[in-house]
Amino acid sequence: MSEQVVTRIAPSPTGEMHIGTARTALFNWLFARGRGGKFLLRIEDTDRARSTPEATDAILRGMDWLGLDYDEEPYSQYARADRHAEVAREMLDNGHAYKCFATQEEIQAFRDEAHAAGKSTLFRSPWRDADPATHPDTPYVIRVKAPLEGETVIDDKVQGKVTIRNDQLDDMVILRSDGSPTYMLAVVVDDHDMGVTHVIRGDDHLNNAARQMTIYRAMGWPLPVYAHIPLIFGPDGKKLSKRHGATGVAEYQLMGYPAAGMRNYLARLGWAHGDDEFFTDDQAKAWFDLDGINKAPARFDFKKLANICGQHIAASDDAALLHELEAFLAATGAEPLTNDQRDAMSQAMPSLKDRAKTFPELLEKAQFCLTSRPIAPDEKAAAALDDVSRGILKELTPQLQTASWSRDALEALVADLAEAHETKLGKLAGPLRAALAGRSVSPSVFDMMLVLGRDETIARLQDAAG
């Protein structure tokens, strides 16, 4: 039986959770979940100066909102520092690492001299092959012994075969002079100890892979499968940044995009399954493969995001949609729905969700059932309530008292009234919208009547008729 797939996402808690991190997390989640594997979360909090509990909370909240469930408790990289140092010492003992006593001043002087001579500034430590008997009693770092000749080949599932000359690899520091491990060592030890089989991450880490492979080989550990995915660009082809719009996951939640729509859109951002644009989580898990990832950077398109999100809102189960809408209200600090409003929203949902792309749009369409009398029409709606239309509304209200409260019966009643006044049904829609919703744009007037019920409908029409 083949080994179980294990993937991970390893964000640094130094700020908001970037949308690019979310996309990487999604790819790892889809790859693992589609193969019955494990998906793990590691918080890379070794940078104590910049790591904050607030940023860690933002990562956990972002993962929760996106619905990217992970196995096991989140790992803390900082908490495993002793294990990282232990591996550095083991590499020292087995001859794959060495103590380097060079000072920062000596290293800088070497680089300045090499630069002036037009030579490589890659530092070559004089301590690499020094006799331990010559070691001074001064602070030292531990450096890995990188191969000096030949090539390192990264067999990358997205980028293809990437070859790096070994004379371009430095003897990187794996343990600092204060005994703390470096990020490059910690990543490898953690991935090995967590059993990670596939490292799917941004292609800005591609060069790191060759350096990290030195540690794997020194320890005799199996290499993971690498897949370095391209970054996300803005619509102008430049790296996605604040000037393009929101870059943080939390911002998209607060803008009211549904999580299922975000997952669908982010999955399509740099990965494709034929021409499929709209798909479910189950389909994405079944289809997702590293072969479908594009080498070129993906461009973030806000119109496409809105379009996909609109399709997911329309396809959502009504109860689940209401639950997510209430979570949106809570996240934005808005007033929660009352029991009556919740009941009205439940009834209205089938007529609300068809053309809303975000939760604010959904709430805007739902205003007619969330507000209470008297309805104050906006300027455009008020213009539809002239003397003639008010007269027609007055005529309509007594007929509604005895009408059968079904869509067909209500449509027939209003159509007959329009015909009696030698006008079209559409001409009565404006005054009816103004009376029932106070807006010129709303769900169908008959949908609103059915949701509001006979008594509330008649009361609103009487208010508007004056």
Image: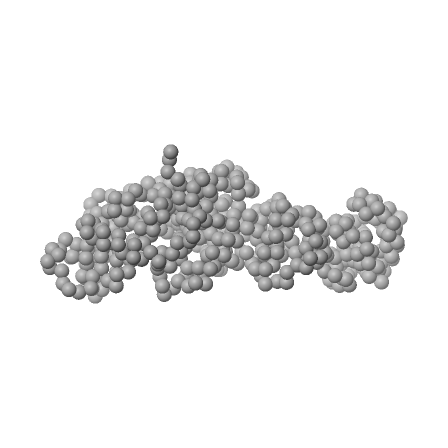
* Residue 141 x %, y %: 22, 59
Instruction: Name the one closer to the observer, 430 or 50.
Output: 50
- Quadrant containing the N terminus is top left
Q: Residue lying farthest top?
A: 1
The residue sitting at 66% across, 59% down in the picture is: 337
Q: Is residue 231 visible?
A: no
Instruction: Name the one closer to the observer, 93 or 396.
Output: 93
Image quadrant in which you'd find residue 197? top left
Instruction: Name the one closer to the observer, 13 or 441.
Output: 13
Left or right of residue 304, residue 270 in this image: left
* Residue 276 x %, y %: 53, 39
The residue sitting at 42% across, 44% down in the picture is: 38
* Residue 275 x %, y %: 52, 38
Total marks in image: 0
Left or right of residue 347, residue 145 in this image: left
The residue sitting at 30% across, 42% down in the picture is: 222
- Quadrant containing the C terminus is bottom right
The residue sitting at 66% across, 56% down in the picture is: 363
Instruction: Name the one closer to the observer, 460 or 46.
Output: 46
Q: Is residue 14 visible?
A: yes
* Residue 395 x %, y %: 88, 54
Image quadrant in which you'd find residue 317? top right
Task: Give the colour scheme shown.
Answer: one colour
Depicted 9 relative to depicted 108: above or below: above
